[in-house]
Amino acid sequence: MKVKANDFISAARLAVRDAGLRAAITTSTLNSDTQRRQAMSAIGRQHAGHMRRQAAEAKRRALRDLPDLLERAEANMRANGIHVLWAEDGPEACRLVLELIERHRASRIVKSKSMLTEEIALNAALESAGLEVFETDLGEYIVQIAGEPPSHIVGPALHMSKDRIRDLFVRKLGMPPTDSAEDMTQFVRRILRQAFLEADMGISGGNFIIADTGTLCLATNEGNGRMVTTLPPVHVAVVGIEKIVETLEDYATLAQILARSSTGQTVTVYNHMIHGPRRAGEGDGPDHVYVILVDNGRSDIYATAYAEALACLRCGACLNACPVYRVTGGHAYGWVYSGPIGAVVTPLLTGLENASPLPYASSLCGKCKDVCPVDIDLPRMLLDLRHDLVERGHSAPLWTIGMRGWAAANRSPRLFEVGGRAIRLGMRFVPRHAPGPVGGWTRYRDLPPASSKSFRQWWRERQKGGNGEQP
């Protein structure tokens, strides 16, 4: 997918004017956030806090030992009969998948939901090679036939209303018109069931890989993940290197908090633990299992102060809580990842120069950190990225001059006081909106009234024994 993150401001302006889009996103995100809070606190807030700290430590311990755990995971997966391949970037990962398809003479591919395959544009690579690819998660299937990228990490079609989906199915799939969501689902199920039965290869992502046992773990709610990984004769999992966890106990903790944070469930409907291909005497499962471990910029992040971002579980909780995401939706962010985590990882994975508005796409309310199941400090990273943008000369010249002038005034007590008096005087003539380049701040906010006295003036009067009413 082409990176269009630098178009965020213009895309966001269009999005906030789309009443239907805002209604769909607001309803879905508010419901998801409410369900998350209820699930997290079901046994009490103290338990929720303990679980969150335990999950955070499990991911950070895995990141601290990531190089060793990757080697341990590879050895144990190979011992289980899984073929392990490594890809330095997206094009190499796509090339490896195409080589496996050629090796096994596959032509019909079914896929389980995977943000990493969206990140590396795997579908486009497969379709360019003349292959038939079916996304089998319902939301992913909807956006695939609509020709759109996902708008949410967990709910790819969250931005689409039922009526729009119905019209899409009628137009693209020939579905008989209906207003019943159940009828629409059954119609798509029949199409996908046939695809499962005829597929030569199944491709999935991976929520976790347990290093101690060499186990690939998937969490799904529709059952499509099990179909993708067991019915075709070949299963290929494309997994980011940051998905490694150390122990089965770590996985048990993270699986629980992932379900609560993403969909408000105590546990997802299907939790797959894949140890390898079908063994002798087993009736189900693929003949071959491949795991492609993908870097694609993750090692570069690992070597920086932003390494904590690699702890992300891709639960989508920060998107559901974010006031900016709620009014703009996911497509405005211009790449695969949206919301607060997208505002951090998109610049890190694609380059700051390709996503310079995203660190500013935040009110810095801190809600994203409050809801993160592994306590990633997203607000701090957004501020650090803003600093990096300024340091690298990516800020607007007028803004840079203004901030330097502000800094100079704040370093000089005399200039600070004179400036304060000028502002208080000027605000008498600008009662509601600020003028010039700072007018953008007051376009959607009332300008607060100025105090009759500055703090410094009040303090001097107080020290001299005057009345010195508090400003």
Image (cartoon, rainbow, N blue to C red):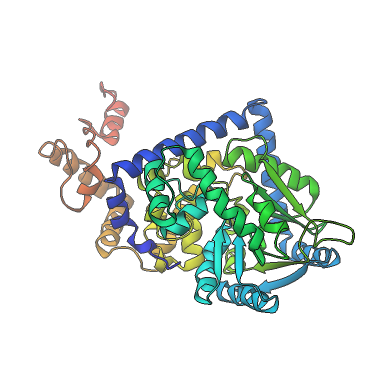
The relative height of residue 232 versus residue 183 in the rendered view (above or below) is below
The residue most toward the right is 281
Taking the spot 37% from the left edge, 48% from the top edge, the residue there is 167
Residue 381 seen by the camera: no
Point 29% across, 41% down: residue: 19
Residue 259 position (above or below residue 275): above
Numbered circles on residues, count: 0
Q: In the drawing, does residue 234 fall left or right of residue 35?
A: right
Residue positioned most to the left: 429
370 or 204, nearer to the observer:
204
Question: How far across and down, in percent of the image, does residue 396 sit?
Answer: 29, 63
Left or right relative to 411: residue 32: right
Q: Quadrant of residue 117?
A: bottom right
Q: Is residue 103 left or right of residue 71?
A: left
| 99 versus 193 height, above or below | below
Q: Quadrant of the C terminus?
A: top left
Provide residue 298's location: percent of width, then percent of height: 60, 65
Is residue 71 at least partly visible in the picture? yes
Compared across the picture, whether 231 is left or right of 263 comes to right
Farthest residue toward the top? Answer: 467
Front position in the image: 366 or 426: 366
Q: Nearer the viewer, residue 242 or 291?
A: 291
> Could you tell me residue 144's position as x and y percent?
47, 58
Q: Nearer the viewer, residue 87 or 370?
A: 87
Residue 219, horizontal then vertical, whole percent? 66, 48
